[in-house]
Image (cartoon, rainbow, N blue to C red):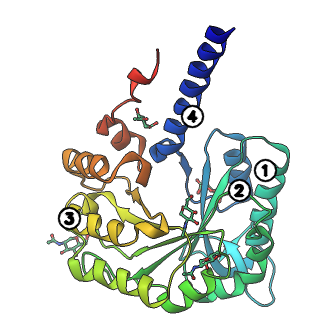
Amino acid sequence: MKMFSIILLVVTASLAFGEEEVMKNLTTVTWAHAVNNKTYLEAALASEVSMLEADIVLGHLNGKDGPPLPIMAHPPATTSDLSLADFLTGVAQYNNVNAKQKGVKLDFKSIEAFEKSQEIIAPFSKPEVTFPLWLNADILPGPIKATTKPVDPAKFIQLAAKHPRAVLSIGWTTNYGGNITEGEYSRDQIGAMLRLVNEHHVNQTVSFPVRAGLASNSQPVLLDLLRETSSLNSSMTVWSSEGDNVEVDRLRALILTVGLERTYLDVPHELAAKLHLPPPNTNAKH
Ligand SMILES: *[C@@H]1O[C@H](CO)[C@@H](O)[C@H](O)[C@H]1NC(C)=O
Ligand SMILES: *[C@@H]1O[C@H](CO)[C@@H](O)[C@H](O)[C@H]1NC(C)=O
Ligand SMILES: *[C@@H]1O[C@H](CO)[C@@H](O)[C@H](O)[C@H]1NC(C)=O
Ligand SMILES: *[C@@H]1O[C@H](CO)[C@@H](O)[C@H](O)[C@H]1NC(C)=O
Ligand SMILES: *[C@@H]1O[C@H](CO)[C@@H](O)[C@H](O)[C@H]1NC(C)=O
């Protein structure tokens, strides 16, 4: 009898360990991009993917006029067949009847779009709703001398704080790819982000989206950023555009130094495969 209970204990302990390992490997989270129309939303919900990334601008539903409203579209588009309200309702309905929940990362392309989205988001940022909700914007100018206008940082952080269960995903505009193949996040750019987080007393989980080709050359400053924000359970989300120049070995070193438990990986399959991330520790099995 005694031996039996010991065996049971061992089995339970190894199971718990196994599950914990999976949960701590954030690179296992998979992403769909630009889920900005009805057809693609249906396809993404029917797929295995765990997070739906989508863009929000102020615009109009196809063929409708009236005051602009938050719709799913990527600039320069200002029309869509899908509003933010219908997008969130669709995801919530899916999650109500499926055990494995899908999360959303809402990428706001202007502060006006975020302001007009507050009441639409609110029902889904209540504590009793449990699917992952990320609020994302590029709020600071980044490498290399990016000229895209960032979303107003103070307003974005203040409004996002009204949705405390949401992950605050805040990054830099970037100018990379094409014939721009080298660059890094500067100490000043990282410092500006830290100052914002401190000045606004950010008190919700934070993830910093960083572009793979630039992040791989910025290990020291990114380690500082994550260390200084560790009380916010901060992580980085490594993303990359198709065709970006990426030093794979340096990116791998960055990811393993930061840790799989603090790194979301949202890059094209080809790049992900080249990383050869280490497999789970097989010693955990008996
Ligand atoms: C819907 O979105 C997907 C993904 O962004 C895109 O590939 C597709 O062309 C879009 N379809 C329409 C009709 O806009
Ligand atoms: C890079 O490409 C852009 C447009 O594609 C061009 O205007 C620019 O001169 C190029 N820069 C260099 C350094 O080749
Ligand atoms: C952070 O938020 C939590 C819950 O929303 C609250 O209990 C806590 O007091 C806040 N901490 C600070 C430093 O504001
Ligand atoms: C960080 O994680 C701890 C442990 O799960 C939790 O108690 C705390 O509220 C989290 N804080 C933030 C800002 O995410
Ligand atoms: C983490 O997840 C990645 C992607 O699914 C996988 O390739 C890798 O083997 C995993 N590593 C660990 C230590 O769990």
Q: CA distance from mark 4 to mark 2?
A: 19 Å
Local secondary structure at mark 3: helix
Mark 1–mark 4 CB contact (< 8 Å)? no
Could you tell which of marks 1 and 3 lies nearer the N-terminus? 1
At mark 4, the secondary structure is helix
Mark sitting earlier along the chain (4/2) = 4
Dot placed on the residue nearer the N-terminal end, 1 or 4: 4
Residue highlighted by disc 3:
220
Q: CA distance from mark 1 to mark 3?
A: 39 Å
Structural distance between the alpha carbons of marks 1 and 2: 7 Å
* Amino acid beneath label 3: Pro
Residue 42 in the image: state x and y as whole percent: 74, 49
Taking the image as shown, residue 24 lies to the left or right of residue 129, namely left
Report which residue position mark 4 lands on.
19
Mark number displayed over residue 95: 1
Q: Of 35 and 1, which appears nearest the observer?
A: 1
Residue sitting at x 48%, y 63%: 233
Q: Kindly state the secondary structure of the residue where label 2 is placed.
A: loop
Q: Is residue 110 left or right of residue 227?
A: right
Q: Quadrant of residue 225?
A: bottom left
Please name the residue shown 48% across and 47% down the image.
26
The picture places residue 134, in percent across and down from the top left corner, at 60, 66
Upstream in sequence: badge 4 or badge 3: 4
Numbered badge on residue 131: 2
The amino acid sitting under disc 4 is Glu
Q: Nearer the viewer, mark 1 or mark 3?
A: 3
Where, by quadrant of the figure, is residue 167 drawn?
Answer: bottom right
Whether pointer 1 and pointer 2 mark residues with C-beta atoms closer than 8 Å, the reply is yes
State how far apart marks 2 and 3 are (Cα).
33 Å
